[in-house]
Image (tube, grey):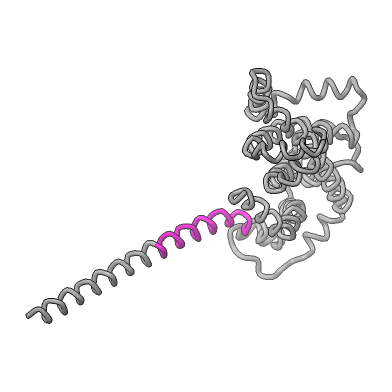
Amino acid sequence: MNALGNSVRSVRRQRGLNQEYFLKRLRSVLAHGSVLMLVLIMLLPLFYLVMMSFKTSTEIASDPLGLPSSLYWGNYMKALSSMGYVRSVLNSLGITLSVIVLVVLAGAMAAYPLARLHNRVSRTIVMIMALGLATPNFVTITPIYVIFRDLGLLDSYLGIVLAFTALKLPLAVFFYTSFIAAIPMELEEAARLDDCSNWQIFWHIIRPLLTPVTATLSLFVMIMVWNDFVYPLLLLTDKDKLTVMIAVYKFVGNTGVDPTKLFPAAVLGSLPLLLLFAFFQRQILSGATAGAVK
C-alpha cells in the first residue's frame, strides 16, 4: 500500500510539474508574442514609408495601400538631384557631432561640482536645470532668435551649434549630476592624497567613469538634434547650410505634396541616423547597461 501511495503521489507531482512548465511556456509565448506584435505595429509606418517610396505616381493614385509592382528607383534619383542630399547630410552630421561634444563636456564639468556641493545653491541650480527640460521649444524660439540676431550669429554653423548646445545642456546636467552623486567619495579622497587637483580628479578619475551615461546621453542628443526641424528653419537661410530635415521639407509645397519625391526624401533623411545607430549599437548598448553593475 505504501508503495502504491508513493507511486500515486509521484504521478501527481510529475503532473503538477508538467502543468507548471506548460503554464510558464504559455506565459513566455504570450509575452514574446505581445512584444513582437508591438514591434510590428511600431514598424508599420516605416514599412509603409519605404513601400511608398518605390511606387510610381500612377500606382500611388490607383492603390495607395498596395505593394509596388516593382522597385522603381527613379523616385530616389529625382529626390537626390533635387535636395542636395550629400551636402545636407554632411551639415546635419557636423552639427550633431559638434553639439554632442559640447554638451558632453560642458554638462559633465557643470554637473561635477553640483553633485559634490551639498548646499542650497547647488540644489537650486539643479532644479533650474531640471525645469529647462520641461520648457517647450516654442517658448525659447523668440529669445534665441533675438539674441543671435544681435550677436550676428544667424545663418551660421556656430549659431545653430550654440543654440542646440544651450537647449540640450539641462538634459546633460540632469543626467550627469545623479550619476556622479553615486560615485564613491573614497576615489576622490585617495586622489587628493596623491596631490591631485580638482581638475585632475575630474579628468582622470570621474570622466572615465561617465562612459555609460555618456553613451546614453549621446544617443538622446543625436536623435533630438538630427530630427529637429524648427531651429534650423529659423536660424539658417543659406541653402548650402541647411540640414537634411529642411532639405526633406522642400518637397512639401503650399498647394500639394509630390509623394514620389517626399517619401524617398524622407527615407534618405532617416537613413544616415539608422546607419549610425546600427554601426554603434554595440557600444551604445554596452555603455547603457554598464552603469547597472558599476
Q: Quadrant of residue 233?
A: top right
Residue farthest along the top direction in this orientation: 120
Left-right relation of 185 to 23:
right
| Whether residue 150 is situated above or below residue 62 in the rendered picture | above
Position in image of residue 152 (x %, y %): 93, 25
Residue 40, magenta (yes or no): yes
Residue farthest along the front direction in this orientation: 193
Residue shown at 77%/55% (left/top)? 272
Q: Quadrant of residue 150?
A: top right
Q: Quadrant of residue 141?
A: top right
Left-right relation of 27 to 251:
left
Q: Nearer the viewer, residue 246 or 102?
A: 102
Position in image of residue 262 (x %, y %): 74, 51
Position in image of residue 101 (x %, y %): 81, 42
Instruction: Tell me how many marks there are.
Output: 0
Residue shown at 72%/32% (left/top)? 111
| Whether residue 253 is situated above or below residue 262 in the rendered picture | above
| Whether residue 16 is situated above or below residue 197 in the rendered picture | below
Left-right relation of 44 to 79:
left
Mainly helix, strand or loop, the magenta region? helix
Position in image of residue 131 (x %, y %): 64, 25
Residue shown at 74%/60% (left/top)? 279
| Whether residue 224 is situated above or below residue 286 in the rendered picture | above
The N terminus: image quadrant: bottom left
Q: Nearer the viewer, residue 126 or 135?
A: 126
Residue shown at 82%/45% (left/top)? 97
The magenta segment is 28-48
Residue 123, magenta (yes or no): no
Residue farthest along the left direction in this orientation: 1
Q: Nearer the viewer, residue 160 or 263?
A: 160
